[in-house]
Image (cartoon, grey):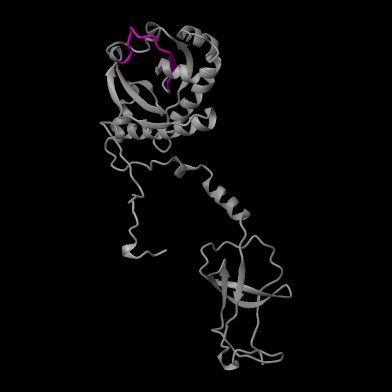
Amino acid sequence: MIFSPDSNLEVENHSLVEAQLSTGVYPWLDLVVRRWAMLLEDTLYYELRIMSVTRGLPVVWKRFEDFLNHDAELPIFILDTVQKRKAVLLLEIPFLRFLTRKHDSEKESEPSLQDMLKAHQKRLLTMIRPFIRDFERSWQKIGEYPLQIKRITTHPKRAQVMLPFERCLVVQVELKMGEFKTRLTLGLPFSEFHSFLTETETRRVLPPESLEHYHEEIEQKLIQILSRSGHSFSAQLGTIDLRDTGGRLVEGQVVPMNSEGTVKIVVNGSHAFQGELGTSGGKYSVQVKSRIQNENRSSLNQAGDFKRVNWFQS
C-alpha cells in the first residue's frame, strides 16, 4: 500500500542481516566454537525444552595449572581425545542446579554438589553427551575431533589430565536462559592441535558458518521433495488471433493458428522447454528438443519410437 507523504506514519528501519563475529588468534577454532554455540541452542530446545541464547567466545590458551582452579569445587567431566589423551569439560554449579531443578524443587534446602551428582549422575551424562556430540559435528569440512566421556569428578586433584606447565586450549560457549547466565568450558591439550593449526594458518577462506550446507544426503532429499510436489505441464501448439472474429466464436467456425513449427512446453505456468509434436505408441506426444540439461534416457517406459507428424495438414 502506498501512503502520501503527509500521512504522518511512523517508520522504523530494519536491517536484514546483522552479525558480530569475534575472532582471536585461532580463527578456525573460533569457527568451530560458533558452530558449537548454534548447535547447543538447538539441542537445549529440542531435547531439554530450554529456550536459550548462545555465544561462542574466542579460543585462547592457558597453562593447565591456570585453567583448572584447584580450590574450586566443580563438576568436571573427563574426556578421551582423538589421540587417547585427556580433555576436561567444566560446568558451573548453578547450571548443574538449573538442569536438575525439576527433581529438587520439593526439597527445602539446595543439595550439595556431591548429592546432586550422586542423585542425578546418569541423567547428567545423558544430557551432556548431546553437548559433546554437537562439538564433534562442529568440525564438519574442517577435520575430526571426537571426544568420549569417561568419568565425572568433583575434585580438581583427580582431574590432573595434563601437566601443570602444559598448554591448554580453552573453548567456551556462553549460555543465557532468561536472566540466568552460565558457560560451558572445554580444556583441550594444545599439543594435539599444533600440526593442525600450522596447516590451517595459511588458509584464507573459511568454510560456511551454517552446517545445513553440509547435509550428507541433500541431493536425495531434494529429489524426495520434488517427487512429493505437484507440477502442471501443458503444451502450447501456437497462438490464435481473435480480433477478426469480433469477440464471438460459433460452432463450426475455423480460426487460423499462428505457429513457428515448435511446441512450447509450459511447467507450472512458465515456458520451460521447446519440443516437437509427433506420435508415440499410437498417441500424440511431444518430444523435448532444447533446454535439456540431463541428457540421460528417460526412465519412463518408451512405448514405441517417436515419429514426426504434420499437424497442420489441409
Query: Residue 123's x, y, as percent?
Result: 55, 18
Q: 7 or 135, which lies in front?
A: 7
Q: Which residues are magenta?
A: 67-81
The image quarter in which residue 288 lies = bottom right
For the N terminus, the quadrant is bottom left
Q: 10 or 107, which lies in front?
A: 10
Query: Residue 35's x, y, as percent?
Result: 40, 35
* Up/down of 259 relative to 141, above or below: below
Q: Is residue 139 visible?
A: no
The residue sitting at the right extreme is: 282
* Up/down of 3 relative to 245, above or below: above
Please tell me which residue is depicted at 54% across the width and 62% down the height of the picture.
Answer: 294
For the C terminus, the quadrant is bottom right
Q: 105 or 282, which lies in front?
A: 105
Q: 197 or 267, which lies in front?
A: 267
State left or right for residue 161 relative to residue 311.
left
Please tell me which residue is depicted at 33% across the width and 58% down the height of the picture.
Answer: 8
State left or right for residue 216 relative to residue 4.
right
Query: Residue 297's x, y, as percent?
Result: 60, 63
Query: Residue 18's x, y, as percent?
Result: 33, 44
Please tell me which residue is depicted at 36% across the width and 50% down the height of the picture.
Answer: 16
In magenta stretch: residue 117 = no
